[in-house]
Amino acid sequence: MGWKLAAVLLVLLIKYTNADCTCYEPGNYTGRLAPISNSFDNSDFSSCYTPCSFLAYSGDDTRRWGGLTINWGSVEDNSGILQIFDGTDITGIPLIQLSAGTNVLSGSTKNLIKSSQPRITIKYTQTGTGANVYYGVIKATPGLQASTLPINTVAPTTNT
Ligand SMILES: *[C@@H]1O[C@H](CO)[C@@H](O)[C@H](O)[C@H]1NC(C)=O
């Protein structure tokens, strides 16, 4: 009887310490279709809530990133934020920022945003411990021009 209770407690302990959370992209990505998804528990592939960040490189300096699509499956923690930075510097304003539960569909404003660099940084953070489920992709496409639909930028002022 005692060992069974201990086994149950051990399983609960493992489950709630979140010890085996693995980021969906544990390294950096090079390629033309970067998958984006939530972290998961190694033992049973259930969703996790660890912060994750990775660099996606198109592998070709004439290719930029865009065409983001994101679908949220279940949202248990509204504090979740997915950010995409133009380049490797993550201290500034992100190119794209999404709150948990905000889907990005093909043809939408955020779907049309393109990076100005061949490298982007995709970062997920949350403050709570509810596990969110999300999945999507961002694509590297030819074209040197910067984003035609910048967001979070200050409107230009003109001098007379
Ligand atoms: C990903 O790239 C960044 C910037 O080059 C580097 O600092 C980081 O260590 C890399 N991460 C992995 C897991 O290779």
Image: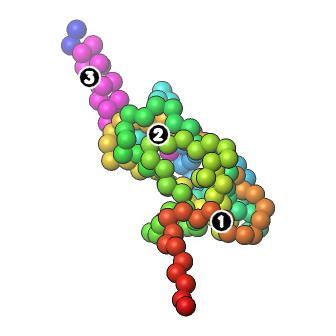
- Magenta part of the protein: which range? 4-23
Question: What's the residue at 55%, 84% (across, down)?
Answer: 158
Mark 3 or 1, nearer chain start: 3
Q: Is mark 2 within 8 Å of ligand 1?
A: no
Q: Nearer the viewer, residue 151 or 23?
A: 151
Decide whether residue 19 is among the magenta residues.
yes
- For label 2, count other residues whose C-alpha is less than 10 Å away and answer few (under 14), some (14-19) or many (20+): many
| Amino acid type shown at disc 1 | Ser
Quadrant of the frame with the C terminus? bottom right
Q: Nearer the viewer, residue 3 or 151?
A: 151
Rendered location of residue 109, percent (x, y): 61, 52
Question: What's the residue at 43%, 34% (across, down)?
Answer: 75
Residue most extreme to the bottom: 160
How many labels, in total? 3
Q: Cα distance, mark 3 to mark 2? A: 33 Å
| Residue position marked by numbered label 2 in the rendering | 101
Rendered location of residue 69, percent (x, y): 62, 44
In the image, which disc is placed on residue 147? 1
Q: Is mark 3 within 8 Å of ligand 1?
A: no
In this picture the colour scheme is: rainbow
Q: Mark 3 against mark 1, which lies toward the viewer?
A: 1
Rendered location of residue 104, percent (x, y): 58, 44
Relative horizontal placement of residue 8, taking residue 147 as reference (left or right) = left
| Amino acid type shown at disc 3 | Leu
| Residue position marked by numbered label 3 in the rendering | 9
Q: Nearer the viewer, residue 22 or 141?
A: 141
Decide whether residue 154 is among the magenta residues.
no
Residue 153 visible in this rendered orientation of the protein: yes
Mark 2 or 1, nearer chain start: 2
